[in-house]
Amino acid sequence: MSAAMVLARSVRAEGVRLGGGRGLLLRVALPLGLGLPVVVTLAVAVVAEKLHGADSLLQVRQVPTSNSVYWLVYLGVTVFAVVAAYAQGTVVRGPAAEAARHGAPRPFTGMLGRWILIGAVSAFGMVLCAFLLMVALPALFPGVCGQVDAASADGVRLLWALPVYAFLAAGIGVAVGALVPWPAAAVAVLTLWALFIENAAVMLPRGGDLIGWMPFLNGVYASGQDIALSPSWGRDGALAYVALVTAALLAAGWARLRRERAR
């Protein structure tokens, strides 16, 4: 059997395991990774539009295109990465581990199939939701979102770079699930790193330089989102850096699984 056929079979197997009514994709990833960011974005826009039209001391600034899908970039991508970490962790530890050991004797094939499936769902969901939001926001909330334009340079950047970043982040999630041998611990490590540690690093000595090397912040910057980060390698370089980090972590996770199975 060719490598492509083996990989395709791995992707289909993950589709069966993670899809369906009780699968992680439908129960967790889609509601929390796509539905929740869209709802929060619209809710914030509703409140901002009311404040904008009211005689209030609060001044509401216009939302630029580069900040229009904030919750998708920060929350949505992280949710899919966490789901990928948990999905990987459950085939390393737990009831599915022994079945995975026999069904996918090559751990890298399973990791790659898992990454392709979750990454593809994440990327497609991100580009679809980002496009719909950038079209709907200026139409529904012209007072605060009238500047949002999906056809602008910032909008086009979000429409192609955000799904690429989401795909790479899912790979980081798979890698963390392979490196950390317990599913719950993998979820905790990835969540704390993406949402807290990377942002809190700025408070450390020379933190301003340190955050320039943080993979998730580089991915956020590369996607086109407004962020107080501008590494010398630019947005495209930041995306390439995230790809390199993903590849290095996947290689480390694969090596750990090989050592464990060789025992």
Image: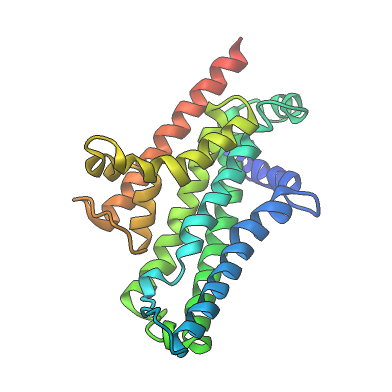
Give whichever of 116, 238 is nearer the camera: 238
| Residue depicted at x 57% and y 67% | 40
Picture coordinates of residue 97 (x, y %)?
A: 72, 26
Whether residue 1 is situated above or below residue 152 in the rendered picture: above
Using the rendered image of the protein, determine whether residue 203 is visible from the camera's viewpoint.
Answer: yes
Residue 104 placement: quadrant: top right
The quarter of the picture where residue 156 lies is bottom left
Give the residue at the far top of this rendering.
Answer: 263
Q: Residue at x 45, y 64 (%)?
A: 70
Residue 144 position by quadrant? bottom left
Query: Image check: 62 left or right of 44?
Result: left
Q: Position of residue 261 (x, y in %)?
A: 62, 17
In the rendered image, which quarter contains the C terminus? top right
In this view, the residue in front, 39 or 238, is 39
Query: Quarter of the image containing the N terminus?
Result: top right
Left or right side of 57 for 31: right
Q: Is residue 243 visible?
A: no
Q: Please give the name of the residue rendered at 63% of the width and 65% of the height, measured from the top-left corner.
A: 35
Q: Is residue 254 above or below residue 46?
A: above
- In x, y percent, where is residue 33? 60, 57
Residue at 50%, 63% in the rendered image: 71
Work out which residue is located at the far right of the displayed protein and give it: 21
Q: Residue furthest left?
A: 232
The mark total stands at 0
